[in-house]
Image (cartoon, rainbow, N blue to C red):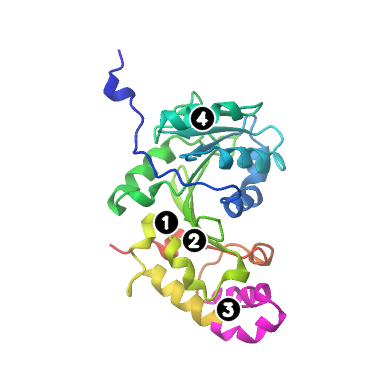
Amino acid sequence: MTSRASARPVGTVTRGTTNPNRLRRMDRWIVAAYGDRLRRAADPVAVDLGYGAAPWTAVELLRRLRSAVPHARVVGVEIDPARVAAARPYEREGLVFRHGGFEIPLPQRPHLVRAANVLRQYDESEVAAVWQRLCSRLAPATADSPGGLLVEGTCDEIGRRHVWVALGPEGPRTVTFATRLGSLERPSDLAERLPKALIHRNVPGEPVHAFLRDFDRAWAAAAPYASYGARQRWIRAVRDLTADWPVTDGPVRWRQGEVTVTWEALAPRG
């Protein structure tokens, strides 16, 4: 018989702060980077983990995923039972809400887990174990399935600045920086939104600090392009970055105010 202790959701309650459209940049990237693989899955299930005090982000995730994956389903998972009860009226075909935490209480392994602004309150030392637990719940890669994806990161309250890590069943793969270019003074402004695994590593001697330093330098060198707009300046700065950093995307994503780098290039030292 399962004990009461073992049946408890894993994790702690977050502040629950949420706003409509807060995660639009992350969702847009998921659809662009992973939509094709989700379409190949027979029953693509996505989890909005720790959606907060209101269900807006789960509702929006379903709508955005279905723009590219019509048969996608979304499960909102929250550790606070009162938040689950409040979200239930928003359930519809393809969208349900469940009480749970990092154990992901679903009968099947999901193809996508999105965990935004969830780990910010945890210690850096706890991140690796949470990542491992969540990655172990992802759908494995098979001949008929591309395997699952975990997207974990942090953004500001209205979604202008966002940094996230993409992980597969094997672990972290990439880090993506995304911003509303019209509000950006310099790329290092994104440092305050680094995910928990990196935010305390933005110090001299760490790769993420060197990356943001080089990005600021490229941004300054690209100042003449500002007369053509912030987008053109960003594209030029990122293009210059590719000489020294393993950028994995291209101009189509850069135009959206994004840049993605391999995890290995930014991973903490020691």
Q: Identify the element where label 2 is drawn.
A: strand
**Image disc number at residue 240:** 3
Taking the spot 56% from the left edge, 79% from the top edge, the residue there is 219
**Image disc number at residue 262:** 2
Residue 100 in sight in this render: no
Counting other residues with Cα less than 10 Å from the Cα at mark 1, is it few (<14), some (14-19), or many (20 or more)?
many
Mark 4 or 3: in front is 4
Mark 2 or 4: in front is 4
Left/right placement of residue 22 relative to residue 213 reads right
Q: Which of marks 4 and 1 is nearer the N terminus?
A: 4
Vertical relation: 225 (above or below) 103: below
Q: Marks 1 and 3, how far apart in space?
A: 25 Å
User: Percent position (x, y) of residue 196?
Assistant: 37, 55
Q: What stretch is highlighted in magenta?
A: 220-243
**Image disc number at residue 64:** none
Q: Identify the element where label 4 is drawn.
A: helix
Mark 1 or 3: in front is 1
Counting other residues with Cα less than 10 Å from the Cα at mark 4, is it few (<14), some (14-19), or many (20 or more)?
few
Counting other residues with Cα less than 10 Å from the Cα at mark 2, is it few (<14), some (14-19), or many (20 or more)?
some
Mark 4 or 1: in front is 4
Q: Identify the element where label 3 is drawn.
A: helix
Quadrant location, the N terminus: top left
Residue, disc 4: 86
The answer to whether the residue labelled 2 contacts the one labelled 4, judged by CB atoms less than 8 Å apart, is no
Q: Identify the element where label 1 is drawn.
A: loop
